[in-house]
Image (cartoon, grey):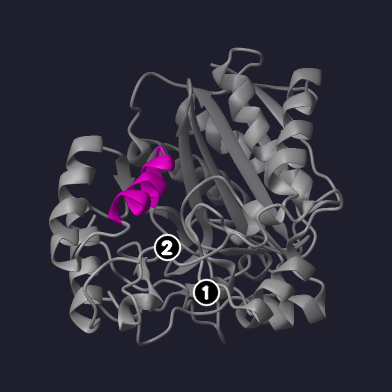
């Protein structure tokens, strides 16, 4: 399969996420070939589609440290990004109802194969959506299925500031209504620590491409973002990613307090953002005056985030059964 | 409000679920959640319809009022 390889990254994390969604849309419409994108973000926490920023992020610290908070269009858990991360994103055309798990496995095995070439052996895909080096997690995956496409992306810890990562991501609270089982902890590790040297963005990307060639039979070629994709990204940026409406989660209706809302305004607005929806966030699934007002939080069985605290991953309360 | 690190496609199903639950007596919520998810058949990875039902049951048990606000 011919696969276009892009290295497309931008200063504005909101635009980076707009491009992230524009590419699979273009692939699904048949405007461009299947695409593997590599990119990085400046300091940012990227939260999952169904997450509330105030539950996942230490907003006060994020505001102090200049860490932006961005909601992405895929599910899964919050991840911390800085320039020590290598983000990869695969957009493929797909049939109706593709098997998301199968694509997690294909992408996970491909990336692990590439890392084994670069700094292994010892890297492997760990279901549901992890890539690990021995017992330590180095990357997490998320996915989405849209019109004509299947999309899988991941964040790889290459040389990330793990101290800031651990302090800016909030672990799930120990006591939370609807929570069935206790938190799990996993180690996370930087690729540079495993390799005993700083690995460049380019050599990591090249190794991952080799992994995709080996596992999925890709025939890669280099290209740029198309004009159609730029137009889609511009529109997504203006109407979605740079708005407080999207960052706050107007659709998931997060339980934001006025103080948290003010902090989110500080850390979440894109350069051209507006405040549409800033006053629309209210609780929906709460019982009047009852304890259920704290909401329903449903988490993956082994945790789908990429958090860290003193060498331990805390951002993964077991909850689901699949 | 339903939040978490799960995967659901299409994501709009979750929004629709929340709208459907508004104003329902809480004792009817778990059955409605299950019925709704089984009818809509969203692609869910990381969780199942039963996980949603369990979460609502636990939340309702710890609450003390009668309707979803």
Would you say the magenta stretch is mainly helix, strand or loop? helix
Report whether residue A203 is seen: no
**Residue A177 quadrant:** bottom left
> In the image, what residue occupies the spot 65% across and 71% down?
A193
User: Between residues A184 and A231, which one lies in front from this camera angle?
Assistant: A231
Q: Answer above or below: position of B26 versus A13.
A: below
Parent chain of label 2: B
Would you name the residue on which mark 1 appears?
Answer: A55
Left or right of residue A14: residue A211: left
Q: Give yes or no for contact between labels 1 and 2 (Cβ–Cβ under 8 Å).
A: yes
**Secondary structure of the residue carrying numbered label 2:** strand
Parent chain of label 1: A
Would you name the residue on which mark 2 appears?
Answer: B3
Residue B50 placement (x, y as % from top left):
17, 57
Q: Which residues are magenta?
A: B7-21
**Secondary structure of the residue carrying numbered label 1:** helix
């Amino acid at each position: 399969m011919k696969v276009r390889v892009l290295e497309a990254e931008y200063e504005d994390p909101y635009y980076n996420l707009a491009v992230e969604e524009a590419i699979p849309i273009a692939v699904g419409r048949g405007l461009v070939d299947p695409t593997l994108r590599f990119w990085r973000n400046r300091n940012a926490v990227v939260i999952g589609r169904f997450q509330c920023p105030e539950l996942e992020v230490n907003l006060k610290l994020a505001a102090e440290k200049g860490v932006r908070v961005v909601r992405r269009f895929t599910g899964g858990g919050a991840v911390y990004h800085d320039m020590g991360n290598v983000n990869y994103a695969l957009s493929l055309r797909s049939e109706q109802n593709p098997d998301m798990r199968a694509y997690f496995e294909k992408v996970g095995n491909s990336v692990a194969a590439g890392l084994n070439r670069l700094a292994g052996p010892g890297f492997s895909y760990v279901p549901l959506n992890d890539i690990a080096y021995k017992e330590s997690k180095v990357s997490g995956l998320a996915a989405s299925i849209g019109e004509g496409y299947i999309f899988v992306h991941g964040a790889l810890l290459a040389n990330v500031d793990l101290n800031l990562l651990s302090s800016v991501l909030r672990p799930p609270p120990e006591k939370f209504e609807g929570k069935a089982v206790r938190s799990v902890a996993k180690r996370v590790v930087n690729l540079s620590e495993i390799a005993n040297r700083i690995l460049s963005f380019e050599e990591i990307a090249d190794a991952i491409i080799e992994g995709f060639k080996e596992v999925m039979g890709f025939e890669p070629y280099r290209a740029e973002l198309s004009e159609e994709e730029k137009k889609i990204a511009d529109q997504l940026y203006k109407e979605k990613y740079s708005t407080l409406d999207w960052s706050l989660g107007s659709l998931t209706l997060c339980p934001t307090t006025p103080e948290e809302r003010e902090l989110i305004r500080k850390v979440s607005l894109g350069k051209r953002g507006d405040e549409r929806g800033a006053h629309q966030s209210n609780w929906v699934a709460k019982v009047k005056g009852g304890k259920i007002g704290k909401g329903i939080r449903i988490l993956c069985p082994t945790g789908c985030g990429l958090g860290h605290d003193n060498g331990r991953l805390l951002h993964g309360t077991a909850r689901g059964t699949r | 409000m339903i939040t978490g690190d799960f995967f659901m496609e299409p994501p709009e199903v979750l929004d629709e679920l929340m709208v459907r639950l508004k104003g329902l007596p809480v004792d009817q919520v778990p059955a409605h959640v299950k019925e709704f998810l089984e009818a809509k058949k969203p692609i869910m990875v990381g969780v199942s319809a039963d996980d949603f039902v369990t979460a609502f049951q636990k939340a309702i048990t710890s609450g003390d009022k009668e309707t979803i606000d």
